[in-house]
Image: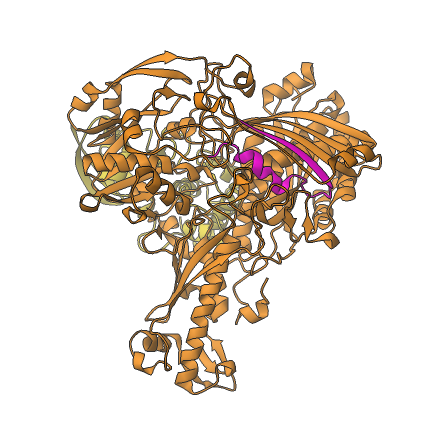
């Protein structure tokens, strides 16, 4: 067992964990933050996307011990009690169907818009290439991210 | 269809793209999928067969059972002792199958042993300690293998590997053949694929020791049927199972087959007296979850020289793998759309369901209709070339015309409404069909190969559940229906419970829109839990989310229950205000006198009378303000071989795909994609558009990327999303979606199916487009998927994809 300490959404967590414990299982089962999902176990679907020190990572491809000392952001930490503009845009543009891919999709979009506040449609599509959605066919998600980019630019937020 | 002006007191919400604010939990990461439930559980892992076909000689679980942290180990032998076998729905030959492998394994991935341990990692460790001795048998992978004369029998008691073989004729097929001037015939091969919901299957089962009763949480798509199956197989009374379905991360039919695992989890819960949890891995899902079957289809059209199709013959052989519960269904359900959008007077169908050592099959999005429309729409293009007509003109000549509605197909399927020519006209115009033909020639001179393809398809909805028993006597299920409870709470807000579940369709918002317009309130005042609980939700054998029944019977039940509540509110208001009920009207959460709106009573006050100040109720009226209603589709016919309807609503669409094919790399790029869709009255166009596009992308995946590939030993080679490729945001076109609205006369709101259409129509549209692009090489598309490798080979050598 190894002792790890991480900050998730600004809150400190510390646990004894097995070295083989996946980060996604740590987030879900130890930190009890269940907005981060498991869809494929092989790093293809992106449902487990989490921000690790600001960068999107697939938390099913990392061990919890590798995240020791890191700052993590999950969907629950994106906007406090309200909704982030990306979340608003996902509602406005019908970018959610079953919701299972949504947290990972939103975090990938968040990382994109932080780096590139004015993405072209092709850039949006590339940014979510690692996130599978089985319901929407992506079009409304792409539109939502474009819409979020516009509202964020207008309000000057990042 | 009801008179909507009478039904609705406002027209503010139905028809508008109302935001899914009821589902805000999904956006915030606060949804509750089964795996999210906070509960102390034992964790389950399955040892699965490594052979496709083998006798089980010995299973030694002693070391696994002795591992510290292991709570229970259960084998197929235990299952056979403690449960009853699976009851098949459509097959005509006897076959015995349990929910785990007993004596024999029949596919790679079939569960052999279940282990419960303190955590999943430990349970997986325990699997490593189990020793199984197999006696391998000859694997029967493809249809041809299973039908060979010397093939071993997969189910010995069946006496054949064909579990269903049915020949059905409707209309005067011989006369059609006599009158025909020419015949076109082709053989097609369809592959195995699946719509793979992003959330895998997940179950928690808890045992209530005193009563030998179970509480189960599962992402089950048809709880109405699952509860019956599970209770029967465990031999417990219906009161012994409470099934709860929380949020579900997509279904697409694939979650209709979870109940065998619910049976296993209940056994494990009983053994351990612990709540036990199983969350399927993606590998398990792809290997031993469920697929759409692969198929071989021969189809022949009998035509007049002018292009009119007089008759259709089909021989359809489905590789149903090794799950007897649903075997045969893919064949039979084709009658929902056997003649597609066309006025074809006679059909002959030979339907065969073959068992093989491939994995289980279940009703994947569209169920058999994607295959039927694929072969039919390919044939219409082939026939058009034979008679020298443009494919669009060929379709115009054969369409069922709007004036023929309601139209009965030869087998008795009733198309209740639709304007097929208008959909095609619109699609031709949006896709720039005529201009494209010119552009194509110019591009070809530059060495680029572009093509355009179309398909016109029916999207049937609301299954008439008796259809697959038409040859086995009276079925256990018939027709289709759903139940709903609508109540006005103490605070005057409205609460809805439905017997169905939500797989991501936004039922709560759609329902809120309908109820809001019926009661003159804001949809924000209508809440609906989409979590089903068999103990408290209204419930029928049909209950669940499948075959696009929501817009029809589910909303039907909501409407009927809301009407009951509304009538009661009017009577209470009439009594309280001293005004005739006929003179009352609904306004912003109040009921008021039409002649003087100041005389009014708020919903909250009405609810107070109904629940609390019950002495103020009109004489003889029961207290309470909550009503239950069950609603059944009125068009369902009882099963009969001569005249039956498989499904009860019929949407339609035209898909037009423009593609470019790189003949050197074999890559197919979709340049433009137009969907013209008619699902009758739309309640929420934002949701409808998402379904139309999403289902189309399922079809695109099936045509261009996805295939469950088996080797000759029956080993599945595509067991992760690295090998089983799904469409990504990159590589898809921007879809143009347009609508035609032909309201359905047999549903209350005029609505029709919307969830499956794209998965049905897209296959042929793309295949026809690829064939058009490769016309200079004379390439014929007779199989799916259209992979780069097959394209290159077809262009260089074979001439056939």
**Depth check: B322 or B491 in front?**
B322
Residue B653: which quarter of the image?
top right
B490 above or below A26?
below
Q: Is residue B359 magenta?
A: no
State the quadrant of the C terminus of chain B: top right
Q: How is the image coloured?
A: by chain
Which residue is at a point 35% across and 50% down the rendered structure image? B28
> As drawn, is B778 to the left or to the right of B190?
right
B387 above or below B791?
below
B259 above or below A149?
above
> As drawn, is B736 to the left or to the right of B300?
left
Q: Which residues are magenta?
A: B326-353
State the quadrant of the N terminus of chain B: bottom right
Colour yellow belongs to chain = A
Counting from the top left corner in percent of width and height, residue B436 is at 75, 37
Colour orange belongs to chain = B
**Depth check: B241 or B193 in front?**
B241
Which residue is at a point 37% across and 47% down the rendered structure image? B247
Counting from the top left corner in percent of width and height, residue A106 is at 41, 44
A91 above or below B287?
below
The answer to whether residue A73 is visible is: no
The answer to whether residue B666 is visible is: yes
Counting from the top left corner in percent of width and height, residue B132 is at 29, 16
Q: Is residue B335 magenta?
A: yes
**Depth check: A146 or B683 in front?**
B683
Counting from the top left corner in percent of width and height, residue B552 is at 53, 55
- Tally of numbered tags: 0
């Amino acid at each position: 067992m190894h002792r790890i300490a991480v900050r998730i959404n600004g809150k400190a967590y510390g646990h004894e964990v097995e070295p083989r414990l996946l980060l996604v299982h740590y987030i879900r089962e130890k930190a009890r933050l269940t907005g981060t999902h498991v869809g494929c176990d092989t790093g293809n679907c992106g449902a487990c996307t989490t921000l690790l020190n600001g960068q999107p990572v697939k938390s099913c491809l990392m061990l919890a011990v590798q995240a020791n000392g890191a700052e993590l952001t999950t969907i629950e930490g994106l906007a406090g009690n309200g909704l982030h503009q990306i979340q608003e845009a996902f509602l406005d543009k019908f970018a959610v169907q079953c919701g299972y891919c949504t947290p990972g999709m939103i975090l990938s979009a968040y990382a994109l818009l932080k780096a590139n506040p004015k993405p072209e449609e092709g850039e949006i599509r590339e940014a979510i290439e690692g996130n599978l959605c089985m319901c929407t066919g992506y079009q409304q998600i792409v539109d939502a991210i474009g819409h979020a980019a516009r509202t964020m630019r207008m309000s000057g937020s990042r | 269809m009801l008179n909507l002006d009478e039904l609705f007191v406002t027209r503010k919400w139905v028809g508008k793209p109302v935001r899914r604010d009821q589902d805000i939990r999904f956006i915030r990461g606060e949804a509750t999928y089964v795996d999210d439930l906070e509960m102390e559980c034992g964790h389950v892992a399955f040892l699965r067969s490594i052979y496709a076909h083998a006798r089980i000689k010995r299973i030694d679980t002693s070391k696994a059972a002795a591992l510290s942290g292991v709570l229970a180990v259960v084998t197929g032998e235990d299952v056979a002792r403690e449960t009853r076998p699976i009851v098949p729905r459509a097959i005509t030959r006897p076959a015995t199958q349990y929910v785990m492998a007993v004596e024999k394994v029949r596919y790679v991935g079939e569960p052999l042993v279940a282990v419960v341990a303190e955590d999943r990692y430990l349970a997986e460790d325990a699997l490593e300690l189990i020793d199984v001795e197999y006696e391998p048998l000859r694997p029967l992978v493809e249809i041809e293998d299973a039908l060979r004369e010397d093939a071993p029998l997969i189910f010995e008691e069946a006496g054949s590997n064909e579990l269903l073989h049915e020949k059905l004729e409707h209309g005067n097929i011989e006369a059609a053949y006599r009158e025909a001037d020419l015949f076109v015939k082709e053989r097609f091969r369809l592959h195995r694929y699946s719509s793979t919901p992003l959330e895998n299957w997940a179950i928690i089962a808890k045992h209530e020791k005193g009563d030998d009763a179970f509480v189960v949480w599962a992402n089950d798509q048809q709880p109405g049927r699952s509860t019956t199956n599970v209770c029967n197989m465990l031999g417990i009374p219906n009161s012994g199972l409470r099934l709860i379905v929380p949020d579900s991360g997509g279904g697409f039919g694939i979650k209709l087959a979870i109940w065998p695992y619910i049976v296993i989890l209940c056994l494990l819960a009983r053994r351990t007296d612990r709540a036990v949890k199983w969350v399927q891995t993606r590998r398990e899902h792809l290997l031993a979850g469920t697929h759409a079957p692969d198929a071989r289809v021969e189809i022949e059209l009998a035509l007049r020289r002018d292009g009119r199709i007089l008759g259709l013959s089909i021989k359809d052989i489905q590789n149903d793998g090794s799950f007897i519960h649903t075997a045969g269904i893919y064949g039979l359900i084709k009658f929902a759309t056997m003649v597609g959008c066309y006025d074809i007077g006679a059909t002959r169908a030979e339907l065969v369901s073959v068992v093989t050592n491939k994995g289980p099959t279940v009703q994947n999005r569209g169920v058999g209709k994607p295959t039927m429309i694929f072969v039919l729409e390919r044939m219409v293009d082939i026939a058009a070339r034979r008679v020298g007509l443009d494919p669009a003109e060929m379709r115009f000549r054969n369409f069922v015309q709007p004036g023929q509605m309601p139209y009965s197909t030869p087998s008795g399927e009733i198309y209740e409404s639709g304007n097929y020519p208008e959909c095609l006209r619109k699609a031709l115009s949006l896709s720039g069909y005529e201009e494209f033909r010119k552009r194509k020639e110019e591009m070809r001179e530059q060495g680029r190969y572009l093509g355009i393809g179309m398909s016109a398809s029916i999207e049937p909805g609301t299954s008439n559940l008796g259809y697959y028993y038409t040859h086995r006597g009276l079925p256990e299920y018939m027709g289709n229906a759903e139940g709903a409870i609508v109540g006005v709470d103490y605070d005057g807000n409205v609460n809805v419970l439905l017997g169905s579940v939500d797989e991501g369709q936004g039922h709560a918002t759609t329902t809120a829109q309908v109820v809001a317009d019926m009661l003159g309130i804001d949809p924000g005042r209508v809440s609906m839990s989409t979590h089903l609980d068999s103990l408290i939700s209204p419930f029928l054998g049909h209950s669940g989310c499948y075959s696009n029944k929501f817009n029809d019977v589910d909303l039907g039940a909501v409407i009927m229950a809301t009407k009951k509540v509304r009538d009661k509110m009017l009577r209470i208001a009439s009594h309280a205000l001293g005004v005739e009920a006929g003179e009352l009207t609904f306004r912003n959460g109040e009921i008021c006198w039409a002649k003087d709106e100041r005389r009014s009573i708020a919903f909250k006050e009405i609810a107070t009378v109904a629940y609390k100040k019950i002495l103020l109720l009109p004489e003889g009226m029961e207290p309470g303000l909550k009503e239950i209603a069950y609603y059944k589709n009125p068009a369902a016919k009882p099963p009969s071989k001569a005249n039956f309807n498989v499904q009860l609503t019929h949407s339609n669409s035209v898909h037009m795909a423009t593609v470019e094919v790189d003949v050197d790399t074999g890559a197919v790029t979709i340049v433009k994609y137009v969907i013209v869709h008619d699902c009758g009255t739309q309640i929420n166009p934002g949701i409808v558009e998402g379904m139309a596009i999403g289902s189309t992308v399922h079809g695109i995946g099936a045509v261009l990327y996805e295939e469950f590939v088996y080797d000759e030993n029956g080993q599945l080679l595509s067991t992760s999303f690295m090998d089983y490729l799904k469409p990504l945001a990159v590589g898809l076109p921007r879809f143009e979606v347009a609508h035609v609205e032909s309201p359905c006369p047999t549903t209350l709101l005029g609505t029709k199916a919307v969830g499956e259409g794209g998965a049905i129509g897209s296959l042929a549209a793309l295949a026809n487009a690829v064939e058009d692009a490769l016309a200079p090489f004379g390439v014929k598309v007779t199989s799916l998927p259209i992979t780069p490798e097959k394209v290159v080979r077809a262009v260089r050598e074979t001439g056939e994809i």
